[in-house]
Image (cartoon, grey):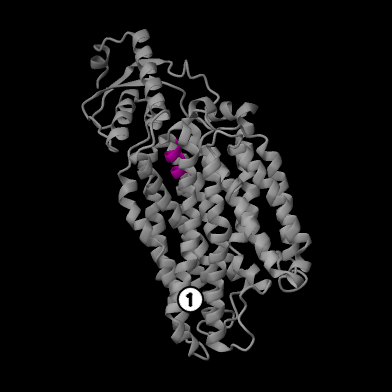
Amino acid sequence: MSDRASSEIPVKEDNQNYSLAHKRRAALSEIDNARFNRFHVKVCLIAGVGFFTDAYDLFAINIASTMLGNVYGPLGHGSATGSGLTANQDLGIKVASPVGTLVGQLVFGWLADVVGRKRMYGVELMIIIVATFGQTLAGHAHAVSIIAVLIVWRFIMGIGIGGDYPLSSVISSEFAPRQYRGRIMTAVFAAQGWGQFAAAIVGAIVVAAAKHRIQNDDPLDPGTVDTLWRLLIGLGAIPGCIALYYRLTIPETPRFTMDIERNVQQAAQDVDTFLTTGTFVVDPDAVVHRAQVPKATRRDFIRYFGQWSNGKILLGTAYSWFALDIAFYGLGLNNSTILQTIGFGKPAASLKGGAAIYQNLLNTCIGNMVLSVAGLIPGYYATMLLIDSVSNWGRKPIQLMGFGMLTIIFCCLGFGYDALVAHSKPAFVFLYCLANFFQNFGPNTTTFVIPGEVFPTRYRSTGHGISAATGKLGAIVAQVGFSRLKDRGGPNVFIKHILEIFALFMLTGIFSTCLIPETKGRTLEDLSNEDQDNFIEGVNRNDIENGKGQ
């Protein structure tokens, strides 16, 4: 509208301020106290399918790298020696995704606070789908190695996966009722465990389907195994394709509409609409009164996080995630290596050629399935049961307990490694599964949940992105360190010391958790450490506009 038209609209500032503040409080109260309904189930499913896809794509490489080694091993393309990838090749394809994820978490975390959660939601899934198909079509030539092509595609895929972290966390937290917020966010994140499990199942199915061809080939036909890893990775795009439409049509969160777009009237209308019908309606001709609220700027960011009461929370969430991912990805991307090192499921010495390769691939898939079912998946649901419970459990106690138990378990695995491997491999596998359990019934889940709650709306996605990116830095450090150190002193000799290093990082995670507040049962606005009674400062007379084109 023109300045003249704006000035003709009478504005009684006190009444206008009170009206907007009242509407904001009413809308927030309606969200926080809503009953769990179909819309919340829809949010869980839409966000959860993305995390299922993320985990599938990230951890399928744990199995696919073994297949790639049978075809593109160090003796060259099509050697079919089964000698495995070189250390640099293995490191490249495993670390490319975490590097891309770090970039995606920072960029999408910031963009979601600038242009909106809705506008970015789905974009990251498109990147994942395209990059996944790109991997399946990658080829080998004299001028370029297929491993190099896969590294590029997995980096691009990682950018999309990184964007999913802050977006899914913030969207699920901002739509969730206060009393169910932790469980809703945990349900979203628990899809990660099912994604890892699905990757192992699909791997086992494609290997079993090719059993006749593999076992009867001596030496192995490289085309057979080359098809398997392409199927394993490519099938990971299907869930993302299914979820894409729903992500593109999800409503904008009312908190973003109120606190960043400053359109309180539209947000209040959205709350009433999506809680009843699950949809939203925007009137292009409605007059919009833009509230005066704190805006995200570089100066405001420094002012807010420069206060120790706020800065220590960001430090706590970021370092806790860093420490956790040192072990989570150090193990998760190398399960096959560790299982083979201790001889779990190793093919019989009598098997040769294709038969040995088939048994090795199948055992790798089964080993990963066992780890998922025995440790990863139960851990998520133990957290879901207790994270919002009325007892003394909550986010912070679960994270402290998890770091404490992981410190003890990794000490047992590391310092007792030689004795366990020599005399009690089942005990080693049990402790290894227990470590997976307490990662998820512990900091792996809570480091995802807490950053989606503790920051103000204008920095919630950015803060989550920074915390998650710091975690992925830990994943990169772990993967590079694992690759470079595991053969120090001989093949896989240094693994026991790596497990001891993991124990040290778990111990430091206990101290960083002390910087984080308990968020159970508190509203997102209360957790922001800002004065909510005077959050709306007024309405600018020149900032009243027609909604058309907004």
Can you give x and y, in whole percent of width and height, for residue 95 in the image? 57, 61
Residue 184 in view here: yes
Depth order, front residue of 195/286: 195
Can you give x and y, in whole percent of width and height, for residue 159 in the image? 47, 53
Q: Residue at x 52, y 58 (%)?
A: 97
Can you give x and y, in whole percent of width and height, for residue 471 in the image? 59, 48
Residue furthest left as drawn: 285
The region drawn magenta spans 166-173
Relative placement, left or right, of 14 versus 192 is left
Magenta stretch mostly in which secondary structure?
A: helix
Depth order, front residue of 182/150: 182
Question: Where, quadrant-wise, is the C terminus in this rendering?
Answer: top left
Q: Residue at x 47, y 40 (%)?
A: 110
Q: Inspect the magenta stretch and tell me whether residue 75 lies in it.
A: no
Q: Residue at x 61, y 65 (%)?
A: 334
Amino acid type indicated by mark 1: Ala
Depth order, front residue of 545/415: 415
Q: Provide the residue designation for mark 1.
A: 143
Q: Inspect the magenta stretch and tell me whether residue 170 lies in it.
A: yes
Q: Dot 1: what SS?
A: loop
Relative placement, left or right, of 297 versus 288 is right
Question: Where, quadrant-wise, is the N terminus in this rendering?
Answer: top left
Location of residue 392 by image quarter: top right
Residue 476 in view here: no
